[in-house]
Image (tube, helix red, strand yellow):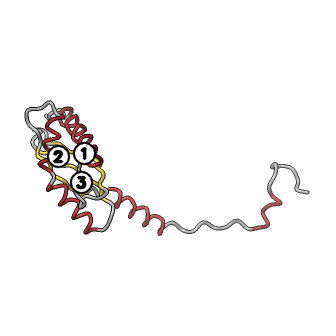
Amino acid sequence: MRAPRRRPDQVGETIRQVIADLLLTELRDPRIGFATVTGVLVTPDLSVATVRVSVMGTEEERAQALEGLSSAAGFLRGRVGRALTARIVPELRFELDRGLEHAARINQILSELRPPEPEAPAGDEATEGNPGEPAS
């Protein structure tokens, strides 16, 4: 039987809110740049939280942002500990969320596969109007 997921989900949401706020207000590491917290997955025993972040920029800038977040993990964990009412504060691990990138790629492939829509001929204007009435 699976353990209930309510508490890990609650802790994950609190961690997401705290880290998102800290990214906007207190973290000044230039490596982080424009990072957005997209989700947090917490293990059932609350020992590890995987923080998924979306970072705009090149692959090198994304790697630097993850490095900056990893170096700030201790500071972030301390702030998360103040917000949580738990005895144990999860270890923070950061990973890139490539969901938006993946969705954009799928959209591009679909648009390439879709045939172009035919243009309506210019002479179709005479057929417009009420059906059943002869065109004058």
Q: Which residue is mark 1?
A: 22
Q: Position of residue 33 (x, y in %)?
A: 29, 59
Left or right for 28, reference 44: right
| Secondary element at tag 3 | loop
Gap between marks 1 and 2, in whole Å? 8 Å
On screen, residue 109 above or below 25: below
Q: Which residue is mark 2?
A: 76
Q: Position of residue 118 (x, y in %)?
A: 64, 67
Left or right for 43, reference 135: left
Q: Are marks 1 and 2 in contact (CB under 8 Å)?
A: yes
Q: Which residue is mark 3?
A: 28
| Image point (22%, 57%), residue name | 29
Q: Position of residue 53 (x, y in %)?
A: 26, 53
- The crowd level at tag 1 (other Cα within 10 Å; few <14, some 14-19, many 20+) is some
- The crowd level at tag 2 (other Cα within 10 Å; few <14, some 14-19, many 20+) is many
Gap between marks 1 and 3, in whole Å? 10 Å
**Viewer-side residue, 47 vs 66:** 66
**Viewer-side residue, 34 vs 10:** 34
The answer to which of marks 2 and 3 sits earlier in the sequence is: 3
Given the image, on which type of amino acid does mark 2 rest? Leu
Q: Position of residue 67 (x, y in %)?
A: 17, 60
The answer to which of marks 1 and 2 sits earlier in the sequence is: 1
Gap between marks 2 and 3, in whole Å? 12 Å
Instruction: Residue lying at the far right in this picture: please name it.
Output: 136
Given the image, on which type of amino acid does mark 1 rest? Leu
| Secondary element at tag 1 | helix
| Secondary element at tag 2 | helix
